[in-house]
Amino acid sequence: SSGDVVGLSVKATKTKLPIKKPVERQEYAGLWGGTFGWPPGKYIEDKPGKALFLLMLGYEETQKDSDERHLIGTKILEGSHGLMHPNGSNMFVVNIDTPSLEPFPFDADGREFEHSYKGDGIADGYGFRYPGSKPGSLYVISNDLLAFVWRETRDVFTLQRLNLEE
């Protein structure tokens, strides 16, 4: 028998990412870019290939108590050769109605923090085959600059709001 023949065609399409305008009680919703490290934008010589992450931040009300809101940072894309965190995973989940009393663990370079919230951030388990989460805090530096810090490791994930209209 000569075997079966399978045809394949590919069609490219161009789609715009949906951009959510911040609304009341959801001021951090939207598309954000992030990297590991502090202070924001600092080049670290021993880590020249720092990955850039794209995250979509959105809100969700808990089922048990509609007064409790969570801010969820979902990873869309990671700009590195090796995949550190699976696409579609929650990088962090923060209870936006529970302030964190944890002090920011690094020199803030004179920055004032508007708010800080308790939450959990992704933690690897066997190379992210069995990911878990570890406690941390989200620090609001401004409406366009956030930092999530894992309490135990003191790793900092710095996020900046992306404005694709500019």
Image (cartoon, rainbow, N blue to C red):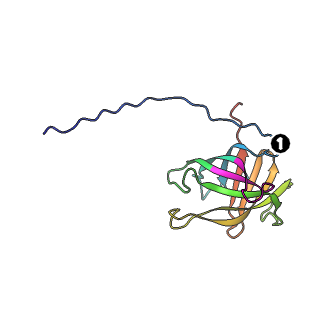
Local crowd size for mark 1, using a 10 Å CA cut-off: few (<14), some (14–19), many (≥20): few
View extreme (bottom): residue: 152
Please check the rendered image and state whether residue 62 is part of the magenta-colored stretch, yes or no. Answer: yes
Which amino acid type corresponds to the residue marked 1 in the rendered image?
Glu
Residue 42: in sight, yes or no?
A: no
Which residue is located at x 54 percent, y 57 percent?
84
Q: Nearer the viewer, residue 56 or 44?
A: 56
Q: Is residue 18 one of those drawn in magenta?
A: no
Residue 72 x, y percent position in the rendering:
69, 52
Q: Quadrant of residue 63?
A: bottom right
Q: Which residues are magenta?
A: 58-74
In front here: 166 or 4?
4
Question: Of all residues shown, which one is farthest toward the left?
Answer: 1
Q: Which element type, helix, strand or loop, lies under badge 1? A: loop
Q: Is residue 66 above or below residue 102?
A: above
Percent x, y for residue 16? 61, 31
- Which quarter of the rendered picture does the C terminus lie within? top right
Write the residue at 62% across / 35% down: 17
Does 87 sit left or right of 11 as displayed? right
Q: How many marks?
A: 1
Q: Position of residue 36 (x, y in %)?
A: 65, 56
- Position of the N terminus, as image quadrant, is top left
Identify the residue shown where x is 22% and y is 37%. Answer: 4
- The quadrant holding residue 121 is bottom right
**Rendered location of residue 111, percent (x, y):** 84, 54
The image shows residue 39, relative to residue 10, as above or below, that is below
Q: Which residue is mark 1?
A: 24
Q: Is residue 118 visible?
A: yes
User: 4 or 61: nearer the eye?
Assistant: 61
